[in-house]
Amino acid sequence: MEAIDLDQAARALESTGFNFLRRSADLQLSMSGARWRLVERTPAALTFRALDAAGDLLPDEMKLDLADVERITWDRLPKQQSRSQIRFHLHSGELWTFSGHVDATLVP
């Protein structure tokens, strides 16, 4: 697992759709049935929108307040060459994980 900066994470997350998993501070795990892509970045937040099967944006959206983010990491599963995880570690102990195929030029 490597630390990455917000610019690296944003470039990767706006490039394609990702599966989304959320682990709460009390270790409960939930996974979204939708794929998500970063559609807006402001100094205060990242906004993600769900994608349909064709890759078109749906109205469902979620925001991540950047003030809540302690650090951002990236890794690749050991047995896979192209599937990566971008993780937002929040001060609360919550973990947001975006999992998908990332172009190797976008991450370390």
Image: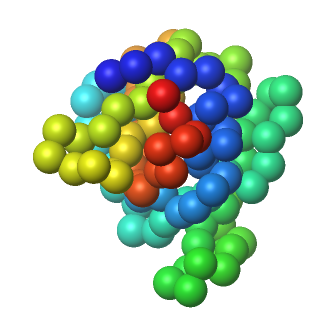
> What colouring does the structure picture have?
rainbow
Q: From the viewer's perspective, is 36 left or right of 7? A: left
* Image quadrant in which the N terminus is located: top left
- Expressed as whole percent of the image width and height from the top left, the position of residue 23 reads 34, 36
Does residue 15 sit above or below 53 in this rendering?
above
Asked if residue 63 shows in the view, the reply is: no
The mark total stands at: 0
Q: Residue at x 56, y 86 (%)?
A: 54
Residue name at image x 41 percent, y 55 percent: 100
* Residue 31, percent from left and from top: 34, 55
Give me the residue at 49% from left, 65% from top.
Answer: 35
In the picture provided, is 70 more to the left or to the right than 97? right
Tell me residue 25's x, y (percent).
36, 24
- Kindly give the residue lying farthest to the front in the view shown: 105
Q: Is residue 35 visible in this depiction of the protein?
A: yes
Q: Which of the 4 image quadrants contains residue 95?
A: top left
Seen in the picture, residue 89 relative to 104 is either above or below; the reply is: above
Instruction: Please tell me in which quadrant of the rendered image residue 70 appears.
Output: top right
Q: Residue furthest right?
A: 42
Image position of 50 with respect to 64: above or below: below
Q: Nearer the viewer, residue 58 or 74?
A: 74
Image: 74 above or below 54: above
Picture residue at 47% right of the left edge, 17% below the top: 3
| Name of the residue lying farthest toward the bottom | 54
Q: Position of residue 12 (x, y in %)?
A: 59, 45
